[in-house]
Amino acid sequence: MALATFDFPAFAAAFDGERTSHDLGWYDLADALWAQSDLLNAQRPQDHPMCGGAIGRLPARGETSCQYALFLLRWLDRPPEDFLAGEVVDVGKVRLPKAGPDQRLRFDLPALHGAINDERRAREMTWAQLADVIGCTPVRLTNLRTAKQADLALVMRVLQWLARPSSDFIHAADW
């Protein structure tokens, strides 16, 4: 089974195109992304604001974490499924959950791990067998149980294997 992959260049082109259409520099974009959660940011002064330089380097890097990507996806008002390439499993119309200025969108990675583990058991697969299908190491999958961050490309391959929309695991949070 070939899993659809996250097309990072298409994602980068989308946020860069939108940034350009709003006549924003990279640091202006970082400010706009951070301002989406301005009330939460005021309550959490220990949180590190977005960095325009880091965002500007994302297209060359070609990857990011699922949590970091949610700032950009929220700003674009597009789910990560919009950027899948290949044979995409149809999971229906996906919309990002709404988040207020006192919230950020976050992937619930422990819940994703639980869903993976349940499906892995139902299919009578070992973690090593599943990792071969997903295209990663078993540790990258088992670490989701306690992870706060994970590679967006990995998360999207897992979601395609589960045939579940990202919105099942994204919620508005206060962290």
Image (cartoon, grey):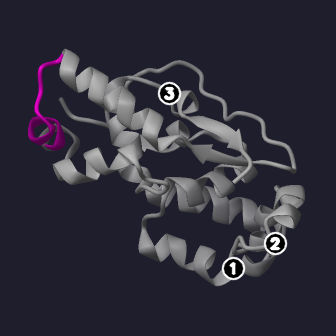
Res 165 label? 3
Quadrant where the N terminus sits is top left
Tell whether 164 sits left or right of 87: right
Does label 1 or label 3 sit earlier along the sequence? Answer: 1
Check disc 2 and report the residue beneath it: 31
Image height of 84 relative to 39, above or below: above
Q: CA distance from mark 2 to mark 3?
A: 29 Å
Distance between the Cα atoms at labels 1 and 2? Answer: 8 Å
- Residue 156: horizontal and vertical position, in percent? 41, 42
Residue 141 is left or right of residue 123, and the answer is right
Q: Is residue 119 left or right of residue 137?
A: right
What secondary structure is found at the residue carrying circle 1? helix
| Rendered image quadrant of residue 164 | top left
The amino acid type, in three-letter code, at marker 2 is Asp
Q: Which residues are magenta?
A: 123-131
Instruction: Give the secondary structure at mark 3.
Output: loop
Q: Quadrant of residue 110?
A: top left
The circle drawn on residue 52 is 1
Determine crowd level at label 2: few under 14, some 14-19, many 20+ residues with C-alpha closer than 10 A: some
Task: Tell me which amino acid carries mark 3.
Answer: Pro
- Does the residue at mark 1 contact the one at mark 2 (Cβ under 8 Å)? yes
